[in-house]
Amino acid sequence: DIQMTQSPSTLSASVGDRVTITCRASQSISSWLAWYQQKPGKAPKLLIYKASSLESGVPSRFSGSGSGTEFTLTISSLQPDDFATYYCQQYNSYPFTFGPGTKVDIK
Amino acid sequence: EVQLVESGGGLVQPGRSLRLSCAASGFTFDDYAMHWVRQAPGKGLEWVSGISWNSGSIGYADSVKGRFTISRDNAKNSLYLQMNSLRAEDTALYYCAKDVRVRGVMYAFDIWGQGTMVTVSS
């Protein structure tokens, strides 16, 4: 099975900060990676698919990059609505797996 | 409006069975793969199972393989998860999720339900 790791596990930031979250796969997954945002008590929301494709309706301050085993999610200017937990997920092969999550909280 | 509504959760004793359902509306259900994802209280997301648009491809997490069975009824716009031999560690909020791609290999999940809670306890 492909294991996904994320760093950091928690990130404290201020509104306006540039934020970067890293996701690593235990083996190459090409670009078959998605990023999700989840707020407390809510279902996850798709932000990025195929490593760098922005889902419709998602603000352009979110971007994704990477391929193979290392990926990043960047928020160019953190907004109050962005404080949440972010998960990466590989869909290269069964079983699909999620990273453990990165919580972005207020500094 | 595209919508997924899960049902069938509840309190069940270890070793017993439960069947979850997911009713889909607002899109052409039989064009898309569907998935179940769970989240234990206070924990992260875990993909449980996925099924292709035509049921030709099915996958399971190692933790549920041999105990859970995913199925779909395209005529009823419904997704199911039959859960047998339930364990305490299966306690979680179970989400139904729609795949992004039309009639393609399984992909990311763009629409999620609100979840149905399953609690396994004696």
Image (spheres, rainbow, N blue to C red):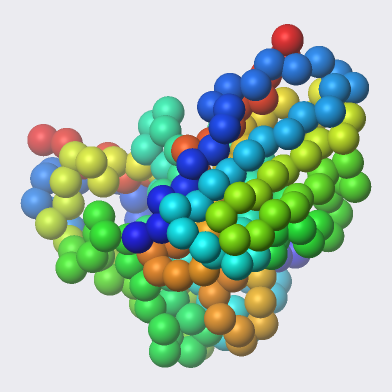
The answer to which quarter of the image holds residue B119 is top left
Q: Is residue B116 visible?
A: no
- Residue B41 in the image: x percent, y percent? 39, 32
- Residue B86 in the image: x percent, y percent? 17, 52
Quadrant that contains the C terminus of chain A: top right
The answer to which quarter of the image holds residue A72 is top right
- Residue A37 in the image: x percent, y percent? 66, 41
Whether B90 is drawn above or below B25: the answer is above
What residue is shown at x 66% (from left), y 70% (from top)?
B100
Q: Which is more toward the observer, A71 or A77?
A: A71
Whether B107 is drawn above or below B121: the answer is below
Would you say B49 lies left or right of B6 here? left
Would you say B15 lies left or right of B11 here? left
Quadrant that contains the N terminus of chain A: bottom left
Q: Which is more toward the observer, B29 or B33?
A: B33
Q: Which is more toward the observer, B45 or A16?
A: A16
What residue is shown at x 41% (from left), y 58% (from top)?
A2
Outermost residue to the top: A107
What residue is shown at x 42% (from left), y 42% (from top)?
B39
Q: Is residue A73 visible?
A: yes
What residue is shown at x 58% (from left), y 27% (from top)?
A8
Would you say A6 lies left or right of A50 here? left
